[in-house]
Image (tube, rainbow, N blue to C red):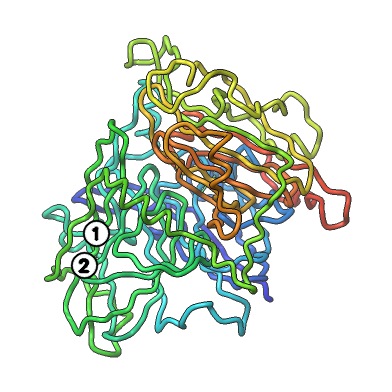
Amino acid sequence: CRVRNYKFHVVSKNVTRLCSSKPIVTVNGKFPGPTLYAREGDNVLVKVVNRVSYNVSIHWHGVRQLRTGWSDGPAYITQCPIEPGQSYVYNFTITGQRGTLLWHGHINWLRATVHGAIVILPKRGVPYPFPKPHEEKVLVLAEWWKSDTEAVINEAMKSGMAPNVSDAHLINGLPGSVANCSSQEVFNLAVESAKTYLLRIINAALNEELFFKIAGHNVTVVEVDAVYVKPFTTDTIIIAPGQTTNVLLTAHQKSGKYLIVVSPFMDAPVAVDNQTATATLHYTSGGTTTTELSGDSPTVLTTPPPKNATQIANQFINSLKSLNSPKYPANVPLNIDHSLFFTVGLGVNPCPTCTAGNGSRVVAAVNNVTFVMPNTALLQAHYYNITGVFTTDFPANPPRVYNYTANITQNMGTQNGTRLYRVPYNSTVQVVLQDTGVIAPESHPVHLHGFNFFVVGRGVGNYDPKKDPKKFNLVDPVERNTLGVPNGGWTAIRFTTDNPGIWFLHCHFEVHTTWGLKMAFLVDNGKGPKQTLVPPPNDLPKC
Ligand code: C2O
């Protein structure tokens, strides 16, 4: 194991996409940002220097941060933001994880342009549990707005209505030849015939689950969210914001250019986004595989699934199982100490000051609590016993009758609060997440910081506490850090609270987080020597 030192300079940069330019916030002037490489067991030190006029904060999405919550990154949850001109060193050790994750800005909508890959290689000498690929390629999927993204969300919060959808999707920063002027903005993935590649696919989009498909090629899924899965073959993958998926791609054709498509999966009736991003899989003859050729149009085409292709999405999600081998066992908690039931959904609350929406605004909530961001970081308040910042009375169950359908007013009528759910160290927790809606039901990719969880069950309609647990998979359920609660359905997760600190849970659709679909767990210290949160670092930003 070694120490990996990184410097992330947060700087503004002018970028042109879709025929128009705007300044964006980047790390080291790169978009997408630099890939962070490490091996399992390494100590990673990232010095983040803020050279823009915004407050910033960076989250290492999916990194467990065992006992190092100070380095997790969500602003006002585990740290105060890094102010303009200030810096902060994130210091964490990668424990028991290998695979692909992502890092991203974690304040307001900074993540729109501040994001990049985390590649964690296995410990030296430890092979992958699948054939060694000829080469590895990172594919970062994202969204692009022609206008400034902070202005987009600020405008929406003023009006009370939904923000504008993005103008394009991106594959490694490029939309594909979707507009006349973007014919040069195409990512080319160069491969050699008969070789196998590991694609590390990351969804860094703000608000869209995405389909990914390559003309004339199937892929074999081998890992999600930095956990190995039982390999399976598919022609389409579905990936939610915050999720990562590693696939093996064998270049079994002789030559040619094959279209790659990335398009939104949105099964809610209010869905409005139809944008497809394109890239090219380009066969080259030996020696030039690292050259990314630009501007070639593919000759073998494919069409993306329709945006409401729920069956294709379900088939993919239901195929995901933990590898559960002797080396990589799935240690699913069998006895549950805390059984929780969370409704997650969108609704409307009164808003006399809103400029649209007839005196109401869109809000989101967990168990009818719309989470209010505090003015100081929760973790500091907890560590230094500062009172009045949060309460620990987050409800274990919804306060009212709920229903997965829309227009049930009990679904919402939310109350504002900074309420946490407190759990002792090393407890087992089950959370059933139930989608509800007043406007419309919608899928919610829910992310939990600080833990991986097992997805033991999933279904449509209202969760049935009598029948549904009998169908739980307690043997080889997929283990991950972000999961899609299905539109008008539920999903059940289990995890063990082996990580003391304060851990954010929220919808990874950034717009839903902004609206309040978030809460946090407070996990107490254990009694043993390695069961306590480490003390805060000296350079921890202050509010
Ligand atoms: Cu990837 Cu709290 O987020």
Q: Nearer the viewer, residue 96 or 329?
A: 329
Task: Kindly report the distance in space between the C-alpha atoms of the residues bearing marks 2 and 1.
Answer: 8 Å
- Quarter holding the C terminus? top right
On whether ligand 1 comes within 8 Å of the CB at mark 1, the answer is no
As drawn, 429 above or below 129: above
Judging by the rendered image, the residue that carries numbered circle 2 is 215
Look at label 2 and name its amino acid: Ala
Residue 260 in the figure: left or right of residue 105: left
* Residue labelled with disc 1: 261
Q: Split into 4 quadrants, where in the image is the N terminus?
A: bottom right
Marks 2 & 1, CB-CB < 8 Å contact: yes
Decide if residue 49 is in sight here: no
- Nearest-to-viewer mark from 2 and 1: 2
Mark 2, secondary structure of its residue:
loop
Q: Is residue 524 visible?
A: yes
**Where does residue 297 sit, x and y in percent of width and height?**
13, 68
Nearer to us in this view, 409 or 244: 409
* Local secondary structure at mark 1: strand
**Which residue corresponds to the image point at 53% horizontal and 45% vertical from the top-left?**
447
Q: Quadrant of residue 215?
A: bottom left
Type of the residue with mark 1 = Val
- Foreground pick, 473 / 119: 473
In the rendered view, does 7 fall on the left or right side of 421?
left
Q: Position of residue 230 (x, y in %)?
A: 49, 68
Give the crowd class for mark 1: few <14, some 14-19, many >=20 residues within 10 Å.
many
Lower sequence index among marks 2 and 1: 2
Is 326 located above or below residue 32 in the figure? below
Residue 249: % across, % down? 34, 74
> Which numbered tag is attached to residue 12?
none
Q: Residue at x 88, y 49 (%)?
A: 527
